[in-house]
Image (tube, grey):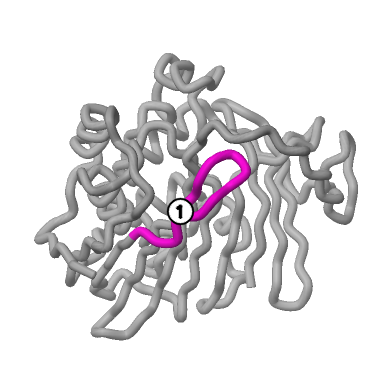
């Protein structure tokens, strides 16, 4: 595997513009055998404080488990807009995310971050693949992320799968009994974009969102995952794995239910429409 080493994190605005400009004509059956790496990345405490504020974490020098995603995502984008990448970025759907950290990270840590693409495989609605991000401190592996993306393609119709049984603790409308009700404001997409740099227009502008089939702008999936972990702050171990699936887009603004259930040190979480039970996110933390 070849490794391209960057001196600084690229800007996501320019990468999104490049993704749109180079979207046509991409095709292929192989992911690039390449990785993008950036070394000795320091933590901007101002940015960390702003991230904690928009996601609901306490102000602290301890990094939220989702925070290194902000450092890794520009590297993933750099790889996905490279001419060797087989799929156009517009239209890819972020369907799942798993983060594992070996210990709590702090603002004083300096991270080396490496990102690669892996495991192109068939899916009933097309093909999916993983963007794998790894962070080390002085050579010690400390954090790992697997973000799974779906490329929708025309496939033969298949028999729909039976829906999974609802979680324990049924509430009204077939959804789980909520632990909390969250009112998600219209501007959370713009606020998260300002902190993370993820300026995908579907999160910022309802007109752009409509071009991709959404009635309104939608929340970033990684903001929603971070918000769930923030709701459990102080009850999670420093070493953990947080695994989620993004089930349906969360339109902005919205009112949603949040459910968390514990079994020892393990948690199950869900975010859903409080009346219909329609799921936006389900997951587990262990």
Mark 1 sits on what residue?
129
Which residue sits furthest left? 7
Characterize the magenta stretch by its predominant secondary structure: strand
Q: Residue at x 59, y 39 (%)?
A: 125
Residue 201 is situated, as x and y percent measured from the top left of the image, at 36, 27
Q: Residues within 10 Å of mark 1 (few under 14, many from 20)?
A: some
Reply yes or no: does residue 202 show up in magenta: no
Q: Nearer the viewer, residue 226 or 211?
A: 211
Q: Secondary structure at mark 1?
A: strand
Whether residue 52 sits left or right of residue 250 in the image: it is: left
Give the quadrant of the C terminus.
bottom right
Whether residue 232 sits left or right of residue 100 in the image: it is: right
Q: Residue at x 29, y 52 (%)?
A: 47
Give the quadrant of the N terminus.
bottom left
Residue 113 is situated, as x and y percent measured from the top left of the image, at 27, 67
Q: Residue at x 51, y 77 (%)?
A: 238
Magenta residues (range): 117-128
Residue 36 is situated, as x and y percent measured from the top left of the image, at 22, 61
Q: Nearer the viewer, residue 211 or 108?
A: 211
Query: In this rendering, is residue 70 above or below 236?
Result: above
Query: In this rendering, is residue 233 above or below 164?
Result: below
Q: Nearer the viewer, residue 160 or 94?
A: 160
Whether residue 121 sits left or right of residue 269 in the image: it is: left
Q: Based on the displayed image, in which of its 4 quarters is residue 155 positioned?
A: top right
Q: Nearer the viewer, residue 165 or 257?
A: 165
């Amino acid at each position: 595997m070849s490794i391209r080493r960057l001196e600084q994190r690229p800007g996501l605005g320019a990468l999104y513009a490049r993704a749109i400009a180079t979207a046509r004509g991409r095709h292929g059956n192989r992911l690039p055998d390449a990785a993008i790496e950036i070394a000795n990345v320091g933590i901007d405490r101002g940015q960390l404080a702003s991230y904690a504020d928009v996601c609901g974490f306490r102000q602290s020098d301890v990094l939220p488990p989702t925070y290194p995603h902000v450092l890794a995502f520009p590297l993933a984008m750099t790889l996905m807009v490279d001419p060797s990448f087989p799929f156009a970025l517009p239209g890819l759907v972020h369907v799942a995310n798993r983060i594992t950290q070996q210990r709590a990270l702090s603002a004083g840590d300096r991270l080396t971050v490496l990102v690669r693409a892996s495991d192109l495989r068939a899916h009933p609605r097309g093909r999916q693949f993983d963007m794998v991000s790894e962070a080390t401190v002085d050579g010690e592996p400390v954090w790992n992320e697997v973000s799974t993306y779906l490329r929708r393609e025309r496939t033969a119709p298949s028999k729909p799968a039976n829906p999974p049984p609802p979680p324990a603790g049924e509430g009204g409308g077939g959804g789980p009994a909520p632990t909390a009700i969250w009112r998600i404001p219209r501007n959370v997409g713009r606020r998260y974009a300002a902190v993370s740099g993820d300026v995908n227009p579907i999160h910022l502008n309802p007109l752009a969102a409509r071009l991709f089939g959404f009635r309104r702008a939608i929340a970033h999936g990684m903001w929603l995952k971070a918000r769930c972990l923030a709701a459990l702050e102080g009850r999670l171990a420093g070493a953990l794995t947080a695994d989620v699936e993004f089930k349906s887009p969360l339109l902005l603004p919205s009112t949603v239910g949040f459910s968390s259930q514990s079994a020892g040190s393990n948690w199950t979480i869900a975010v859903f429409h409080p009346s219909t039970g329609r799921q936006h996110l389900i997951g587990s933390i262990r």
